[in-house]
Amino acid sequence: MGNQASPAPRSTIGSVRRFYFLEYFYVLLKSIERYPDTEQAFELFKILKRKHRLGESKYKTKLETEELSPHQINRYRYTFSEVIEESVEYGLACLVDQSTLCITDVGINLLKQYEEGDITGFNRFLFHRMEHRYKAFRFLLELFYAKNSKIPGLLIFPNYSPRQLKYQRSSFTTTIDVISYSHSLIDAISDDILKYLGVRWDLHEHNENIISRLKESHLLPDRDDEYFFPKSYNAIIKRFRDYWQAYFLKEIYGYEFSLSSFERWLFRGKQIGILYATDFYPSFSGRIVYPTAIVIDHTTSPDFELVYNEYDDGRKLYIHTPRWEVIQDKFVDALVESYFDLRRSNHSYFINLLSLREIVCYKLKIPEFMFQSFLDKAYKLNLTGHLNIKISLEVDKLPEETSAIYLTREPVMIDGKHRNIIAIDVDREGK
Protein backbone atom coordinates (compact mmCIF):
# COMPACT_ATOMS: atom_id res chain seq x y z
CA MET A 1 0.00 0.00 0.00
CA GLY A 2 2.03 2.93 -1.26
CA ASN A 3 5.32 1.74 0.18
CA GLN A 4 7.56 2.80 -2.71
CA ALA A 5 8.53 6.35 -1.91
CA SER A 6 8.86 8.85 -4.72
CA PRO A 7 11.69 11.40 -4.68
CA ALA A 8 11.13 13.94 -1.90
CA PRO A 9 10.29 17.48 -3.02
CA ARG A 10 13.32 18.72 -1.15
CA SER A 11 13.14 22.34 -2.24
CA THR A 12 9.54 22.91 -1.18
CA ILE A 13 8.22 20.67 1.56
CA GLY A 14 10.08 22.51 4.30
CA SER A 15 8.96 25.94 3.14
CA VAL A 16 5.26 25.74 3.97
CA ARG A 17 3.98 28.90 5.71
CA ARG A 18 3.82 28.97 9.48
CA PHE A 19 0.19 28.38 10.38
CA TYR A 20 -1.83 25.24 11.05
CA PHE A 21 -5.53 25.93 10.61
CA LEU A 22 -7.08 25.90 7.15
CA GLU A 23 -9.73 28.29 8.48
CA TYR A 24 -7.09 31.00 8.21
CA PHE A 25 -7.75 31.06 4.47
CA TYR A 26 -11.42 31.80 5.13
CA VAL A 27 -10.56 34.51 7.66
CA LEU A 28 -8.22 36.21 5.20
CA LEU A 29 -10.55 35.96 2.21
CA LYS A 30 -13.45 37.34 4.23
CA SER A 31 -11.28 40.23 5.39
CA ILE A 32 -10.14 41.06 1.86
CA GLU A 33 -13.64 40.74 0.45
CA ARG A 34 -14.84 43.36 2.92
CA TYR A 35 -11.78 45.63 2.89
CA PRO A 36 -9.27 45.72 0.00
CA ASP A 37 -7.15 48.16 2.02
CA THR A 38 -4.45 46.12 3.74
CA GLU A 39 -4.71 47.82 7.14
CA GLN A 40 -8.49 47.62 7.22
CA ALA A 41 -8.33 43.99 6.15
CA PHE A 42 -5.86 43.32 8.98
CA GLU A 43 -8.23 44.85 11.54
CA LEU A 44 -11.03 42.51 10.44
CA PHE A 45 -8.55 39.61 10.27
CA LYS A 46 -7.72 40.16 13.96
CA ILE A 47 -11.41 40.09 14.89
CA LEU A 48 -12.21 36.98 12.86
CA LYS A 49 -9.05 35.22 14.02
CA ARG A 50 -10.15 35.59 17.62
CA LYS A 51 -13.79 34.76 16.83
CA HIS A 52 -12.71 31.46 15.27
CA ARG A 53 -10.24 30.87 18.12
CA LEU A 54 -7.30 30.45 15.74
CA GLY A 55 -3.98 30.40 17.54
CA GLU A 56 -0.45 30.10 16.21
CA SER A 57 -0.15 26.53 17.52
CA LYS A 58 -2.03 23.40 16.47
CA TYR A 59 -4.54 24.05 19.27
CA LYS A 60 -7.43 26.44 19.18
CA THR A 61 -7.60 29.11 21.88
CA LYS A 62 -10.32 30.05 24.29
CA LEU A 63 -12.32 33.11 23.29
CA GLU A 64 -10.29 36.19 24.16
CA THR A 65 -11.84 39.46 25.29
CA GLU A 66 -8.88 41.33 26.72
CA GLU A 67 -6.90 43.97 24.88
CA LEU A 68 -4.17 42.63 22.63
CA SER A 69 -0.60 43.34 23.69
CA PRO A 70 1.93 44.78 21.20
CA HIS A 71 3.60 41.36 21.10
CA GLN A 72 0.29 39.66 20.22
CA ILE A 73 -0.42 42.23 17.51
CA ASN A 74 3.00 41.55 15.99
CA ARG A 75 2.26 37.82 15.98
CA TYR A 76 -1.12 38.46 14.39
CA ARG A 77 0.49 40.62 11.73
CA TYR A 78 3.09 37.96 10.98
CA THR A 79 0.39 35.31 10.56
CA PHE A 80 -1.61 37.73 8.40
CA SER A 81 1.34 38.11 6.02
CA GLU A 82 1.97 34.36 5.93
CA VAL A 83 -1.64 33.60 5.00
CA ILE A 84 -1.56 36.31 2.33
CA GLU A 85 1.58 34.81 0.75
CA GLU A 86 0.13 31.32 0.60
CA SER A 87 -3.25 32.57 -0.65
CA VAL A 88 -1.53 34.44 -3.46
CA GLU A 89 0.45 31.30 -4.25
CA TYR A 90 -2.80 29.33 -4.65
CA GLY A 91 -4.52 32.00 -6.73
CA LEU A 92 -7.05 32.91 -4.04
CA ALA A 93 -5.92 36.51 -3.59
CA CYS A 94 -3.61 39.02 -5.22
CA LEU A 95 -1.49 42.00 -4.23
CA VAL A 96 -2.48 45.09 -6.19
CA ASP A 97 0.18 47.22 -4.52
CA GLN A 98 1.77 47.53 -1.06
CA SER A 99 -1.45 48.80 0.50
CA THR A 100 -4.14 47.04 -1.54
CA LEU A 101 -5.28 43.42 -1.73
CA CYS A 102 -7.89 41.76 -3.89
CA ILE A 103 -9.79 38.48 -3.84
CA THR A 104 -9.83 36.46 -7.06
CA ASP A 105 -12.81 34.66 -8.59
CA VAL A 106 -11.33 31.42 -7.26
CA GLY A 107 -11.13 32.98 -3.79
CA ILE A 108 -14.74 34.18 -4.02
CA ASN A 109 -15.94 30.67 -4.89
CA LEU A 110 -13.92 29.17 -2.04
CA LEU A 111 -15.31 31.76 0.40
CA LYS A 112 -18.85 30.93 -0.70
CA GLN A 113 -18.17 27.22 -0.23
CA TYR A 114 -17.13 27.78 3.38
CA GLU A 115 -20.05 30.07 4.17
CA GLU A 116 -22.51 27.56 2.74
CA GLY A 117 -21.22 24.99 5.22
CA ASP A 118 -19.26 22.78 2.81
CA ILE A 119 -16.20 22.55 5.04
CA THR A 120 -15.11 19.24 3.53
CA GLY A 121 -15.20 20.74 0.04
CA PHE A 122 -13.37 23.83 1.30
CA ASN A 123 -10.60 21.72 2.82
CA ARG A 124 -10.39 19.43 -0.20
CA PHE A 125 -9.94 22.39 -2.55
CA LEU A 126 -7.10 23.74 -0.43
CA PHE A 127 -5.58 20.27 -0.26
CA HIS A 128 -5.54 20.10 -4.05
CA ARG A 129 -3.73 23.44 -4.30
CA MET A 130 -1.24 22.45 -1.60
CA GLU A 131 -0.52 19.06 -3.14
CA HIS A 132 -0.12 20.53 -6.61
CA ARG A 133 2.48 22.93 -5.22
CA TYR A 134 4.30 20.83 -2.62
CA LYS A 135 3.48 17.10 -3.07
CA ALA A 136 3.93 16.96 0.70
CA PHE A 137 1.06 14.65 1.55
CA ARG A 138 2.19 11.96 -0.86
CA PHE A 139 5.69 12.28 0.52
CA LEU A 140 4.43 11.82 4.10
CA LEU A 141 2.07 8.96 3.29
CA GLU A 142 4.80 7.00 1.54
CA LEU A 143 7.25 7.81 4.33
CA PHE A 144 4.80 6.51 6.94
CA TYR A 145 4.13 3.23 5.15
CA ALA A 146 7.83 2.69 4.45
CA LYS A 147 8.96 3.22 8.04
CA ASN A 148 6.71 0.73 9.82
CA SER A 149 6.11 -2.71 8.38
CA LYS A 150 4.85 -4.19 11.66
CA ILE A 151 1.85 -1.84 12.01
CA PRO A 152 1.63 -0.28 8.54
CA GLY A 153 1.81 3.50 8.57
CA LEU A 154 1.96 3.98 12.34
CA LEU A 155 4.60 6.36 13.70
CA ILE A 156 5.17 6.84 17.42
CA PHE A 157 6.78 9.66 19.38
CA PRO A 158 7.08 8.43 22.99
CA ASN A 159 7.16 10.98 25.79
CA TYR A 160 7.42 10.00 29.45
CA SER A 161 7.39 12.50 32.26
CA PRO A 162 9.38 11.70 35.42
CA ARG A 163 6.12 11.03 37.28
CA GLN A 164 5.07 8.42 34.69
CA LEU A 165 8.36 6.63 35.40
CA LYS A 166 7.76 6.91 39.16
CA TYR A 167 10.15 9.81 39.79
CA GLN A 168 8.79 12.59 41.98
CA ARG A 169 9.92 16.11 41.29
CA SER A 170 11.04 16.50 44.88
CA SER A 171 13.50 13.63 44.36
CA PHE A 172 15.33 15.48 41.56
CA THR A 173 18.12 17.24 43.40
CA THR A 174 21.46 16.11 41.96
CA THR A 175 22.90 15.24 38.57
CA ILE A 176 22.79 11.51 39.33
CA ASP A 177 19.02 11.75 39.85
CA VAL A 178 18.61 13.13 36.34
CA ILE A 179 20.91 10.44 34.93
CA SER A 180 18.83 7.76 36.66
CA TYR A 181 15.66 9.18 35.11
CA SER A 182 17.32 9.30 31.68
CA HIS A 183 18.14 5.58 31.87
CA SER A 184 14.55 4.71 32.79
CA LEU A 185 13.39 6.96 29.96
CA ILE A 186 15.45 5.25 27.24
CA ASP A 187 14.37 1.83 28.56
CA ALA A 188 10.71 2.84 28.14
CA ILE A 189 11.33 4.37 24.71
CA SER A 190 13.26 1.28 23.55
CA ASP A 191 10.38 -0.95 24.65
CA ASP A 192 7.96 1.19 22.60
CA ILE A 193 10.18 1.01 19.52
CA LEU A 194 10.25 -2.78 19.74
CA LYS A 195 6.52 -3.07 20.48
CA TYR A 196 5.21 -0.71 17.81
CA LEU A 197 7.94 -0.68 15.14
CA GLY A 198 9.26 -4.20 15.58
CA VAL A 199 12.94 -3.25 15.78
CA ARG A 200 15.58 -3.03 18.50
CA TRP A 201 17.30 0.34 18.88
CA ASP A 202 20.27 1.14 21.11
CA LEU A 203 19.78 4.62 22.57
CA HIS A 204 22.51 4.69 25.23
CA GLU A 205 25.02 6.70 23.19
CA HIS A 206 22.39 9.31 22.43
CA ASN A 207 21.39 9.44 26.07
CA GLU A 208 24.98 10.24 27.02
CA ASN A 209 24.90 12.97 24.38
CA ILE A 210 21.89 14.61 26.06
CA ILE A 211 23.54 14.51 29.49
CA SER A 212 26.70 16.09 28.03
CA ARG A 213 24.67 18.86 26.43
CA LEU A 214 22.86 19.55 29.70
CA LYS A 215 26.19 19.92 31.44
CA GLU A 216 27.63 22.11 28.69
CA SER A 217 24.65 24.45 28.95
CA HIS A 218 25.10 24.53 32.77
CA LEU A 219 21.65 23.10 33.45
CA LEU A 220 23.41 20.21 35.20
CA PRO A 221 26.61 20.34 37.28
CA ASP A 222 29.58 18.30 36.05
CA ARG A 223 29.84 16.26 39.26
CA ASP A 224 27.13 13.64 39.67
CA ASP A 225 26.65 14.35 43.39
CA GLU A 226 26.24 18.10 42.95
CA TYR A 227 22.89 19.83 43.39
CA PHE A 228 21.36 21.63 40.43
CA PHE A 229 19.25 24.78 40.57
CA PRO A 230 15.60 23.72 41.17
CA LYS A 231 14.30 26.21 38.62
CA SER A 232 16.20 24.27 35.94
CA TYR A 233 13.89 21.26 36.34
CA ASN A 234 11.35 22.20 33.64
CA ALA A 235 14.08 23.19 31.18
CA ILE A 236 15.86 19.86 31.74
CA ILE A 237 12.73 17.79 31.16
CA LYS A 238 11.89 19.82 28.05
CA ARG A 239 15.39 19.16 26.67
CA PHE A 240 14.77 15.41 26.94
CA ARG A 241 11.36 15.67 25.25
CA ASP A 242 12.59 17.87 22.40
CA TYR A 243 15.69 15.79 21.80
CA TRP A 244 13.84 12.49 21.48
CA GLN A 245 11.08 13.96 19.34
CA ALA A 246 13.65 15.33 16.88
CA TYR A 247 15.63 12.08 17.05
CA PHE A 248 12.62 9.95 16.13
CA LEU A 249 11.67 12.24 13.29
CA LYS A 250 15.11 12.50 11.71
CA GLU A 251 17.05 9.38 12.69
CA ILE A 252 14.33 6.74 12.94
CA TYR A 253 11.87 8.01 10.34
CA GLY A 254 14.26 9.84 8.02
CA TYR A 255 12.33 13.12 7.78
CA GLU A 256 15.03 15.55 6.67
CA PHE A 257 13.16 18.80 7.13
CA SER A 258 12.33 20.78 10.25
CA LEU A 259 10.11 19.56 13.05
CA SER A 260 7.94 22.65 12.63
CA SER A 261 7.26 21.86 8.95
CA PHE A 262 6.35 18.28 9.88
CA GLU A 263 3.92 19.59 12.49
CA ARG A 264 2.24 21.96 10.06
CA TRP A 265 1.77 19.32 7.36
CA LEU A 266 0.61 16.81 9.92
CA PHE A 267 -2.14 18.94 11.39
CA ARG A 268 -3.23 20.35 8.06
CA GLY A 269 -3.52 16.75 6.87
CA LYS A 270 -5.59 15.91 9.93
CA GLN A 271 -8.15 18.57 9.03
CA ILE A 272 -8.38 17.24 5.47
CA GLY A 273 -8.68 13.61 6.56
CA ILE A 274 -5.39 12.36 5.13
CA LEU A 275 -3.41 11.94 8.35
CA TYR A 276 -4.31 11.42 12.00
CA ALA A 277 -2.31 12.59 14.98
CA THR A 278 -3.04 12.59 18.68
CA ASP A 279 -1.12 13.27 21.87
CA PHE A 280 -3.87 11.66 23.95
CA TYR A 281 -4.21 8.07 22.84
CA PRO A 282 -5.21 5.96 25.87
CA SER A 283 -2.51 3.56 27.08
CA PHE A 284 0.26 5.26 25.10
CA SER A 285 2.48 7.99 26.50
CA GLY A 286 3.30 10.44 23.74
CA ARG A 287 2.02 11.03 20.22
CA ILE A 288 0.86 8.53 17.64
CA VAL A 289 0.53 9.39 13.95
CA TYR A 290 -0.97 7.27 11.19
CA PRO A 291 -2.42 7.66 7.68
CA THR A 292 -6.11 7.66 6.79
CA ALA A 293 -5.27 7.71 3.09
CA ILE A 294 -3.13 5.80 0.59
CA VAL A 295 -1.16 6.50 -2.59
CA ILE A 296 -1.53 3.67 -5.10
CA ASP A 297 -1.97 3.08 -8.81
CA HIS A 298 -5.65 2.20 -8.58
CA THR A 299 -8.32 0.77 -6.28
CA THR A 300 -11.88 -0.37 -6.86
CA SER A 301 -12.76 -0.34 -3.17
CA PRO A 302 -15.78 1.91 -2.51
CA ASP A 303 -14.29 2.73 0.91
CA PHE A 304 -11.57 4.88 -0.69
CA GLU A 305 -12.32 8.17 -2.43
CA LEU A 306 -10.03 9.49 -5.15
CA VAL A 307 -8.96 13.04 -4.27
CA TYR A 308 -5.79 13.60 -6.31
CA ASN A 309 -4.69 12.11 -9.63
CA GLU A 310 -2.12 14.54 -11.01
CA TYR A 311 1.16 12.85 -10.04
CA ASP A 312 3.64 12.50 -12.91
CA ASP A 313 3.98 8.73 -12.47
CA GLY A 314 0.21 8.12 -12.64
CA ARG A 315 -0.25 7.15 -9.01
CA LYS A 316 -3.27 8.50 -7.15
CA LEU A 317 -4.16 9.58 -3.62
CA TYR A 318 -7.26 8.10 -2.03
CA ILE A 319 -8.81 9.03 1.33
CA HIS A 320 -10.50 6.36 3.44
CA THR A 321 -14.14 7.49 3.49
CA PRO A 322 -16.36 4.46 4.19
CA ARG A 323 -20.10 5.02 3.77
CA TRP A 324 -22.33 4.75 6.84
CA GLU A 325 -24.50 2.08 5.23
CA VAL A 326 -21.45 -0.13 4.82
CA ILE A 327 -19.60 0.58 8.06
CA GLN A 328 -22.54 0.92 10.49
CA ASP A 329 -22.23 -2.49 12.14
CA LYS A 330 -18.43 -2.32 12.25
CA PHE A 331 -18.56 1.19 13.74
CA VAL A 332 -21.06 0.21 16.44
CA ASP A 333 -19.03 -2.90 17.31
CA ALA A 334 -15.83 -0.83 17.60
CA LEU A 335 -17.68 1.76 19.70
CA VAL A 336 -19.01 -0.83 22.13
CA GLU A 337 -15.79 -2.83 22.38
CA SER A 338 -13.68 0.29 22.93
CA TYR A 339 -16.16 1.69 25.47
CA PHE A 340 -15.98 -1.41 27.63
CA ASP A 341 -12.18 -1.53 27.36
CA LEU A 342 -12.05 2.03 28.70
CA ARG A 343 -14.71 1.35 31.31
CA ARG A 344 -12.71 -1.55 32.73
CA SER A 345 -9.59 0.58 33.06
CA ASN A 346 -11.42 3.68 34.36
CA HIS A 347 -13.90 1.92 36.68
CA SER A 348 -16.63 4.36 35.73
CA TYR A 349 -19.99 4.06 33.94
CA PHE A 350 -19.48 7.33 32.05
CA ILE A 351 -16.15 7.52 30.25
CA ASN A 352 -14.36 10.24 28.33
CA LEU A 353 -15.87 10.46 24.83
CA LEU A 354 -12.70 12.03 23.45
CA SER A 355 -10.62 9.05 24.58
CA LEU A 356 -13.19 6.73 23.03
CA ARG A 357 -12.93 8.71 19.80
CA GLU A 358 -9.15 8.16 19.70
CA ILE A 359 -9.49 4.39 19.94
CA VAL A 360 -12.34 4.04 17.43
CA CYS A 361 -10.62 6.31 14.88
CA TYR A 362 -7.47 4.22 15.17
CA LYS A 363 -9.29 0.90 14.83
CA LEU A 364 -11.25 2.00 11.76
CA LYS A 365 -8.60 4.40 10.35
CA ILE A 366 -11.12 7.21 9.96
CA PRO A 367 -10.72 10.98 10.54
CA GLU A 368 -12.20 12.72 13.59
CA PHE A 369 -14.96 14.38 11.57
CA MET A 370 -16.14 10.98 10.29
CA PHE A 371 -16.29 9.67 13.85
CA GLN A 372 -18.49 12.62 14.78
CA SER A 373 -20.76 12.01 11.78
CA PHE A 374 -21.05 8.27 12.46
CA LEU A 375 -21.68 8.70 16.18
CA ASP A 376 -24.35 11.29 15.42
CA LYS A 377 -26.11 8.79 13.14
CA ALA A 378 -25.77 5.99 15.70
CA TYR A 379 -27.08 8.22 18.49
CA LYS A 380 -30.16 9.19 16.47
CA LEU A 381 -30.87 5.53 15.69
CA ASN A 382 -30.50 4.88 19.41
CA LEU A 383 -33.08 7.61 20.22
CA THR A 384 -35.63 6.02 17.89
CA GLY A 385 -35.01 2.51 19.23
CA HIS A 386 -33.40 1.23 16.03
CA LEU A 387 -30.14 0.20 17.66
CA ASN A 388 -29.52 -2.78 19.93
CA ILE A 389 -27.45 -0.64 22.28
CA LYS A 390 -28.38 2.35 24.40
CA ILE A 391 -26.15 5.40 24.20
CA SER A 392 -26.15 8.17 26.82
CA LEU A 393 -24.22 11.34 26.00
CA GLU A 394 -23.60 14.11 28.52
CA VAL A 395 -21.39 17.12 29.16
CA ASP A 396 -18.98 17.00 32.07
CA LYS A 397 -17.17 20.33 31.74
CA LEU A 398 -16.67 22.25 28.52
CA PRO A 399 -13.18 23.57 27.73
CA GLU A 400 -14.52 27.11 28.06
CA GLU A 401 -15.35 26.36 31.69
CA THR A 402 -11.78 25.49 32.57
CA SER A 403 -8.74 27.68 33.10
CA ALA A 404 -7.00 26.20 30.05
CA ILE A 405 -5.57 28.68 27.54
CA TYR A 406 -5.71 26.23 24.64
CA LEU A 407 -8.44 23.76 23.70
CA THR A 408 -6.27 20.69 23.30
CA ARG A 409 -9.32 18.53 22.61
CA GLU A 410 -12.67 20.00 21.69
CA PRO A 411 -15.93 18.25 22.59
CA VAL A 412 -17.82 16.25 19.98
CA MET A 413 -20.93 17.83 18.45
CA ILE A 414 -23.76 15.27 18.56
CA ASP A 415 -27.40 16.05 17.81
CA GLY A 416 -26.57 19.75 17.84
CA LYS A 417 -24.94 19.75 21.29
CA HIS A 418 -21.38 19.48 22.56
CA ARG A 419 -20.73 16.22 24.43
CA ASN A 420 -17.65 14.86 26.13
CA ILE A 421 -18.71 11.86 28.23
CA ILE A 422 -20.56 8.72 27.14
CA ALA A 423 -22.17 5.61 28.59
CA ILE A 424 -23.32 2.56 26.64
CA ASP A 425 -25.66 -0.25 27.62
CA VAL A 426 -25.87 -3.37 25.47
CA ASP A 427 -29.24 -4.98 24.81
CA ARG A 428 -28.16 -8.56 25.36
CA GLU A 429 -31.45 -10.00 24.13
CA GLY A 430 -31.09 -8.13 20.85
CA LYS A 431 -27.68 -9.59 20.18
Image (spheres, rainbow, N blue to C red):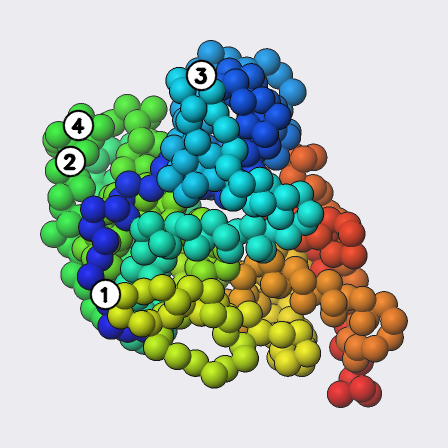
Q: Is residue 37 visible?
A: yes
Q: In front of the other: label 3 or label 1?
A: 3
Q: Amino acid at mark 1?
A: Ser
Q: Which residue is mark 1?
A: 6
Spatial CA span between label 3 and label 1: 42 Å
Question: Few, some or many C-alpha atoms within 10 Å of disc 3 (few <14, some 14-19, many ≥20)?
Answer: few
Q: Is residue 427 left or right of residue 59?
A: right
Question: Which residue is at 38% across, 70% downward?
Answer: 316
Pick whichever, 329 or 298, lies toward us: 298
> Sequence order check: which comes first, mark 2 or mark 3?
3
Q: Residue 309: horizontal and vertical position, in percent?
A: 39, 67
Pick whichever, 378 or 421, lies toward us: 378
Question: Which residue is at 27% across, 66% downward?
Answer: 312
Question: Which residue is at 71% across, 43% downward?
Answer: 397
Against 233, residue 293 (above or below) is below
Q: Which residue is mark 3?
A: 99
Q: Looking at the rendering, in which quadrant would you find the C terminus?
A: bottom right
On residue 217, the disc is: 4
Spatial CA span between label 2 and label 4: 6 Å
On residue 213, the disc is: 2
Q: Is residue 239 left or right of residue 100?
A: left
Q: Amino acid at mark 4?
A: Ser
Q: Amino acid at mark 3?
A: Ser
Q: Residue 24: horizontal and vertical position, in percent?
A: 51, 37
